[in-house]
């Protein structure tokens, strides 16, 4: 396909589509991972964070581009990722991979259930001076409000998710700049293990949370289908361009935010924020006492969680209903499915399942960083980094992508992240 889209008959419409998808992919990635990333990544010190900053952009771009190509180059066009995996690897392996996909996306929804409850609870108590409310009250209300968005339809929900991303980008930049006077570069240079081996091990241990924080794989299946509808089967140049823009946005805004927070927090602040199981901005709002941080922090956190929750909830619905069709096709048919499209009863049952699970996790409040490291290190690394490489090597339809240097880079990073996760679990 020619890259000169400006000469097409509807250039502005196509540019608008690209911009919308860029924001959608960015919004899917921005969530609890980014808001907790400064606590995890910054605790290792200057040099590990600098190396991780250099690595994460290429890692994100090449891995997500490979995943999208895996979907977009299926011989049968118009199929989502779960149908593509079944087509590529057969019914049995396809079912196993569909389960892994579900275990990749669904826990993220649970992470947001914890994050939204902790954020609002902290805001009520610390900024508004209100009483501590029972998590059995807060969790159903907050998770229920986010899950209810699913019932209004995908188009409206995605429009709302895109709308909240714009103030989120502005607010992240504003906070990053606001914290500059509080930076303490000298002490940050001394943080962590500064030996050569210490820096290497620190970089490896940072990677699982980085992979999670920069992942928009939950939206790539629908993204590939959307780009196919817009540009036809030969949409890869435009798809790669959008993925590149999304990666650039994530790298610039996220890592600037991470650096600014880490330099302003210091080692003691990082440990305390982690102990409180709070997003870094909620911690700043509590300790600074300034009106700016007190009110902008919860806005950023809620916007980040909401924008990402919607994208991962859609992925969860996709995976849950696919597995339901395989496990209990008769039940799914009785719930009104027609021509491969889910019936309203199946949709509502899936939404209720998501609501109950996310509410219970929000009530019991497990460690978010532990959940992020486990999910990011094992499931996201396999699904985003390793599976596309296996598909490129094994599937004839993808043979045109074999031998690229980026393939070896992505596969190596995926293996490193898996090793880092296992290492972290046993240490």
Image (tube, grey):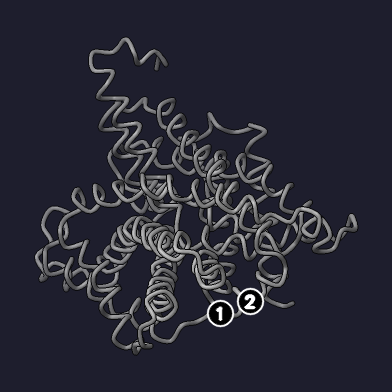
Look at 36% across and 57% down and name the residue there: 303
Give the class, few, some or many, for how many residues have Cα within 10 Å of label 1's Cα (few <14, many ≥20).
Answer: few
Separation of marks 1 and 2 at Cα, in angstroms = 6 Å
The disc at residue 211 is none
Q: Quadrant of the N terminus?
A: top left
Confirm or deny contact between disc 1 and disc 2 (CB under 8 A).
yes
Residue situated in front as seen by the camera: 273 or 185? 185
Which corner quadrant of the image does residue 117 belong to?
Answer: bottom left
> What residue is disc 2 on?
272
Horizontal placement of 140 versus 272: left or right? left
Which corner quadrant of the image does residue 370 belong to?
Answer: bottom right
Give the class, few, some or many, for how many residues have Cα within 10 Å of label 2's Cα (few <14, many ≥20).
Answer: some
Q: Is residue 393 above or below residue 144?
A: above
Look at 16% across and 73% down and name the residue there: 331
Look at 20% across and 67% down and name the residue there: 148
Horizontal placement of 391 versus 205: left or right? left
Q: Position of residue 79 (x, y in %)?
A: 30, 44
**Residue with the most extreme right position:** 195
The disc at residue 276 is 1
Q: Is residue 72 above or below residue 38?
A: above
Q: Is residue 123 above or below residue 11?
A: below
Which corner quadrant of the image does residue 338 belong to?
Answer: bottom left
């Amino acid at each position: 396909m020619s890259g000169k889209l400006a000469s097409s008959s509807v250039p502005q419409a196509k540019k608008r589509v690209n911009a919308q998808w860029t924001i959608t992919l960015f919004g899917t990635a921005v969530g609890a991972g980014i808001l907790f990333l400064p606590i995890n990544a910054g605790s290792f010190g200057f040099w590990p964070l600098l190396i991780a900053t250099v690595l994460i952009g290429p890692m994100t771009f090449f891995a997500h581009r490979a995943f999208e190509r895996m979907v977009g180059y299926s011989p049968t066009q118009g199929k989502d990722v779960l149908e593509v995996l079944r087509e590529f690897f057969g019914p049995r392996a396809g079912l196993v991979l569909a389960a892994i996909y579900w275990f990749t996306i669904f826990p993220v929804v649970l992470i947001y259930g914890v994050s939204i409850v902790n954020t609002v609870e902290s805001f009520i108590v610390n900024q508004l001076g209100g009483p501590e409310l029972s998590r059995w009250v807060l969790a159903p209300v907050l998770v229920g409000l986010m899950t209810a968005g699913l019932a209004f339809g995908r188009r409206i929900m995605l429009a709302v998710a895109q709308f909240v991303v714009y103030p989120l980008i502005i607010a992240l930049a504003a906070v990053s700049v606001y914290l500059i006077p509080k930076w303490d570069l000298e002490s940050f240079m001394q943080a962590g293990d500064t030996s050569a081996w210490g820096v290497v091990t620190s970089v490896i241990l940072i990677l699982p949370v980085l992979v999670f924080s920069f992942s928009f794989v939950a939206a790539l299946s629908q993204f590939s289908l959307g780009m196919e509808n817009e540009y036809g089967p030969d949409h890869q140049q435009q798809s790669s361009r959008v993925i590149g823009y999304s990666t650039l946005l994530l790298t610039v805004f996220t890592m600037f935010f991470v650096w600014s927070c880490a330099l302003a927090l210091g080692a003691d602040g990082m440990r305390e924020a982690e102990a409180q199981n709070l997003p870094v901005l909620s911690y700043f709002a509590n300790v600074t006492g300034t009106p700016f941080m007190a009110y902008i922090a919860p806005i950023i956190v809620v916007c980040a969680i909401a924008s990402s929750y919607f994208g991962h909830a859609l992925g969860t619905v996709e995976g849950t209903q696919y597995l339901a069709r395989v496990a209990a096709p008769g039940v799914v048919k009785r719930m009104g499915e027609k021509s491969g499209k889910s019936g309203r009863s199946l949709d509502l049952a899936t939404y209720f399942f998501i609501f109950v699970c996310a509410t219970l996790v929000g009530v019991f409040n497990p460690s978010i960083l532990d959940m992020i490291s486990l999910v990011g290190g094992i499931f996201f690394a396999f699904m985003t980094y390793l599976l596309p490489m296996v598909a490129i090597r094994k599937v004839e339809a993808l043979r045109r992508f074999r031998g690229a240097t980026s393939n070896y880079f992505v596969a190596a990073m995926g293996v490193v992240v898996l090793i880092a996760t296992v290492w972290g679990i046993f240490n």
